[in-house]
Image (cartoon, rainbow, N blue to C red):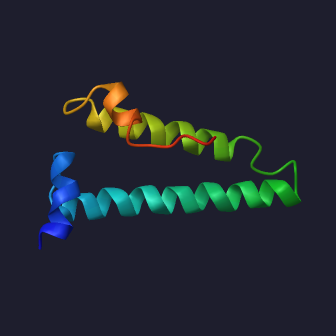
Amino acid sequence: MRIFTEHPATIGETYSQHFIHASGFGLSMLTGGFACLAHAIFPWVCEKTGSNMIRKLYRSMVTNRADIATLDEVESHFDWVI
């Protein structure tokens, strides 16, 4: 059972809360990804959708984690490639 609760606990969430938040992020990332693919084919479509989605997700993650971690601590969990 620990395998399901250890990581969520480090960010102050239960397994269920983490599941909901992570699923929401995943769906948002898929939406942004499909928008980027549409933009690749049709350059006039979704010109800012991918960038806006990245900004929205980043703000959401930093804002939601601000009470349990500093920005440096949050960013240390990610390998930024963008």
The image shows residue 6 at horizontal and vertical percentages of: 17, 59
Q: Is residue 48 left or right of residue 6?
A: right
Q: Quadrant of residue 69?
A: top left
> Can you say whether 24 is above or below 12 in the image?
below
The image shows residue 53 at horizontal and vertical percentages of: 57, 45
* The residue positioned farthest toward the bottom in the image shown: 1
- Quarter of the image that includes the C terminus: top right
Q: Nearer the viewer, residue 76 or 31?
A: 76
* Residue for point 19% across, 47% down: 10
The image shows residue 60 at horizontal and vertical percentages of: 39, 39
* Residue for point 21% across, 45% down: 11
Q: Is residue 9 left or right of residue 75?
A: left
* Residue for point 38% across, 42% down: 77
- Quarter of the image that includes the N terminus: bottom left
* The residue positioned farthest toward the left in the image shown: 1
* Residue for point 14% across, 58% down: 14
Q: Nearer the viewer, residue 27 or 78?
A: 78
> Can you say whether 70 is above or below 79 in the image?
above
Q: Nearer the viewer, residue 16 or 3?
A: 3
> Can you say whether 72 is above or below 45 in the image?
above
Q: Is residue 38 left or right of residue 4?
A: right
Q: Exactly how many numbered labels are in the figure?
A: 0
The image shows residue 19 at horizontal and vertical percentages of: 28, 64
Q: Quadrant of residue 25?
A: bottom left
Q: Quadrant of residue 78?
A: top left
